[in-house]
Image (cartoon, rainbow, N blue to C red):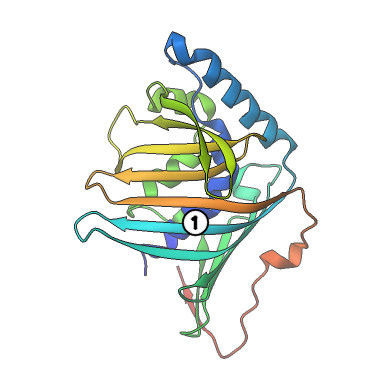
Amino acid sequence: MRKFIPFCLSLALLVSTLGFLPGGGAKAQTAGLVSSILSRMEKNKRSLKSLRANISMTKYNSQLRDSDLYQGVVMYIPGAGGNASSSVRLEWTRPKHEILAVLNGNYTLCQTRLKQCYQGKTGRIKNERDSDVLALMNMSAAQLRTRFGEFQDVHDETLGGGVWTQHFKVTPKGAASYKYIEVWVDSDGMPVQTKMVEKNDDSTTVRLTEVERNASISSDQFKLNPDSSFKIIKG
């Protein structure tokens, strides 16, 4: 369970941060295409006031050659101070009901079936499997350019549901807990799918569908107030 918490937080931050992936070092034949993708992503990030979407996550186990599928809904409001002040609600509905809310740098993760909630500071989660991903999401653009090499495998691709995207792949230059990350960006500059491949070839693919940009979202959505029947576990 302790490893599941930082992974959920990784997903919760994912939507707002991929717009700052590195723009330098592309080969000449793809430089113009990469520049266009990054321009759309930056425009999307600047204009994004809120986000609501369906979310699916597929975790693939390369040894077992088997996958686990999670489905739910994500809501997001960017904060003026970056990730630390952003508000996120990630509610899984399948295979079980769990709700993660992030508000003002604090998280609450409630498991409704077990009647228990984990609470803590997002910045205190360290030395876990997904800590490298969380670190990546808090890097500046300059740090990202230092961390990653050139864009690879840049091409147009249509995802399920007829969603046109442009795909690219980035590989960390130094030590990391994963081999590479793939990103699919739609015509509005929104990263609607990501895939992280680990060193053992396990992978995690996250897909956003039915994306609503700048929808009206109440701040109450990010406040979880479990009743007395829930056990509170401080993280």
Q: Residue furthest left?
A: 63
**Image x and y of residue 19, in percent:** 58, 34
In this view of the protein, can residue 19 be seen by the observer? yes
Q: Is residue 1 above or below residue 106?
A: below
Q: Residue furthest front?
A: 162
Please identify the quadrant where the N terminus is shown.
bottom left
64 vs 165, left or right, is left
Image quadrant assignment for residue 27: top left
**Image x and y of residue 78, in percent:** 68, 47
Question: Which amino acid lies under the numbered mark 1 shown in the image of this protein?
Answer: Leu
Neighbourhood count class around disc 1 (C-alpha, 10 Å): few under 14, some 14–19, many 20 upward? many
In this view of the protein, can residue 103 be seen by the observer? no
- Residue at position x 53%, y 81% in the image: 112
**Image x and y of residue 222, in percent:** 67, 64
- Residue at position x 58%, y 50% in the image: 161
160 vs 46, left or right, is left
8 vs 108, left or right, is left
Determine whether the residue tagged by mark 1 lies in a helix, strand or loop: helix
Q: Is residue 86 above or below residue 112?
A: above
Please identify the quadrant where the C terminus is shown.
bottom left
144 vs 176, left or right, is right
- Residue at position x 50%, y 59% in the image: 56
Taking depth in this image into account, of 109 and 57 the one nearest to the observer is 57
- Residue at position x 65%, y 77% in the image: 225
**Image x and y of residue 71, in percent:** 51, 65
Taking depth in this image into account, of 156 and 148 the one nearest to the observer is 156
Query: What residue does disc 1 label?
Result: 9
